[in-house]
Structures are given as structure tokens and as C-alpha cells.
Image (spheres, helix red, strand yellow):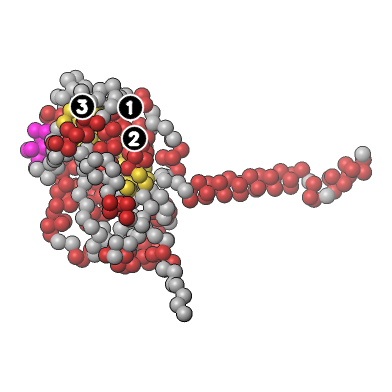
Amino acid sequence: MKILDSLFVASPLLNPRKMLSLICVSLGLLLLIGLLFKFAFADGDFTLISKKHVKREAIEGKVVWITGASRGIGEILAKQFANLDAKLILSARNKSELERVKSELKGKYAPEDVKVLPLDLASGEESLKHVVEQAVSLFPGAGVDYLVHNAAYERPKSKASDATEETLKTTFDVNVFGTITLTKLVAPHMLNQGGGHFVVISSAAGKVPSPGQAIYSASKHALHGYFHSLRSEFCQKGIKVTVVCPGPIETSNGTGTSTSEDKKSPEKRVSSERCAELTIIAASHNLKEAWISHQPVLLVMYLVQYMPSLGFWLMDKVGGKRVEVAEKKGNTYSWNLLFGEKKTKTN
């Protein structure tokens, strides 16, 4: 036994301290590999996907006002909020489509108690003021707990220098001026009732360079500046803000099904249902910002956020190619933009 003990102490391979260090290093490497594997197949940032489930108590019985609710993500958000027993106000320009969405909702307050409130974000402050006065009175004594800014205007990808004045004005009238004006009008009511929550459906384009979408990207950057500042000013008074940044999303037409364009798209997209689910999870957990996307968009967002020089270099490298691919209706989120298309051999 003494001989064995002396060997155990003398042998560096069996030294308890070195063995413990080796075990710790091995566990660290396994953890890192696990995180990288999870990141490779993630559809959201680490904080968001760690939450996993909606905090139902934060949604149930609350008044949720959704703009752009007649189709796409807005329609899916309405269905999921209804299933969580929220009291809903649905807004968009098309009243008949809003009525269709309302008729399809299921929940404690749906469809009977769902309110339809037509809204045009580009209609000006006086018109929006009238709509807000209606919205806060639709559920007497309740006001508006959540205002989900989902309505947005986006044009097909084009070069930054090709943007027309009409495109610039239309995009900013809806995405920026209308959205901010509506917020400015609703905020005093939320403050009077002790608080409220703005959920802003922004875009990955609001966080990282987006070649081919310069005007749209500019409008989303503006929302980030406004809403993060708003939260900092009023968070002590009960105002919450969650800015959601989706990457490519499988949108839908007015019936909640994928459009033919999406089905033909070579791009890997997060489904509208998953995007809506993650958005509600982020809001119910009061996350200040949430990113929703597959790779490589998530990687680019992390690089631009934490290693900006590398992130911007990467986007500069693919920028011109991305616009060319968009013109050919190709995959504008492909790794091939960075590494180049594979050349086929010819005899």
C-alpha cells in the first residue's frame, strides 16, 4: 500500500490537483462546444431562448393593442395573445381583414370582446389622436397595457443611391413618424394608469448594416434611438419597452398561410408563428431587446454588437454582392455571399 501511495503522489498524471484542473478544463471545453452547437441552431439570442416559456400572468386579462394586425406577424400575434386570454384591440387600414382576423380568434375574450379599430399611421397627429382616444376607452377603466408596434412599410431591396423621395417619405411616415406620434399620444395615458408596455417590432436591419435596404434600415435605426431613450426616461414611472429585431421571417398573406413568394424563397426563415411566440416571451419577461433569426444573421448581429470592426468588415465584404443577388431573387442571407458560389466543373 505504501508503494502504491508513493506512486500516486509521485506520478504527475495521477496528481489530484492536476487531475482536478484537467477535469475543469475538459468540462469547460464541453460547455463551450455545447454553447457553440446551441448557437449554430438557435433562432434567437441567448437571453431570449433561455426564457423558453411565456409568463402567462403578465398577459392574461391585459389590454393589448396591435397595429398591422390584418396579416402576417400581426395576425399571428393576435391569435397567440387571444389564446393567452388577453383583451385585444386590432388595428390596420383594412377593416374587413381585421374583421376576418377577429372571427378566427379563440380565447376567454375572443372573438366576442375583441375590438376592431381601423388605423392609418400616415394619417397625421390629429387623426391619430382621435384613434388613441377611442382605444383607451374601448375597455372602460382598463386603458391600454401593451401597444404592439407591428405595422411597417418595406420596399424590395435596391441600392441606397436609388431610393426615391417618395420611398423615403412613405417609409418614414409609417415606420418612424406615425409610430413615434402614436407612442407620444398613448404614453400619457399609460403614465396616468401607472404604467404600460411598448413592444416594438423592429428588424435585424435596425441593428446591423443591411445592404439593399438602406431606407428601411434607417427607419428601424431611428426607432431604436427613440424607444431606448423613451424607456430610460420613463422606466421609473412604469413604462416598459421591448424592441424586437427579427431577421428574415416567413411572412403570410391575408389568410395566415405562406405566400408563394416565401415558398420559392431560398432563404432560411423563422416562421411567423415562432417569431410571434418569441416576441410574446420577450415582452412577458420584460426583455429590453430581443433578436430573432437563424444563422448567419444572428452571428452578424453578435459581431456588430460586440466586435463592431469585424462585423462591419464582414458586411462591407458582402454588401455589393447582396444587392446583386437580391436583383436575381437569390438568397440574400447565404454564407456564399462571403465565401463565393461553388464553381461547377465543366468538361
Based on the picture, tell me whether residue 127 belongs to the magenta stretch.
yes
Question: Horizontal and vertical percent for residue 288?
Answer: 35, 39
Where is 319 relative to 216, above or below?
Answer: below
**Amino acid type, callout 3:** Val
Q: Would residue 133 be visible to someone looking at this image?
A: yes
Q: Would residue 313 be visible to someone looking at this image?
A: no
| Residue on which the image places disc 1 | 84
Mark closest to the chain's N terminus, 2 or 3: 3
Residue at the extreme front of the image, as rendered:
347
Where is 218 relative to 143, above or below?
Answer: below
Residue at the extreme left of the image, as rendered:
126
| Residue on which the image places disc 3 | 114
| Residue on which the image places disc 2 | 280
Q: Are marks 1 and 2 in contact (CB under 8 Å)?
A: yes
The stretch in magenta equals: 124-131
- Name the side, left or right, on which 92 lies relative to 262: left
- Assign a secondary structure to mark 1: loop
Question: Horizontal and vertical percent for residue 201?
Answer: 28, 43
**Amino acid type, callout 2:** Ile
Quarter holding the N terminus is: top right
Separation of marks 2 and 3 at Cα, in angstroms: 18 Å
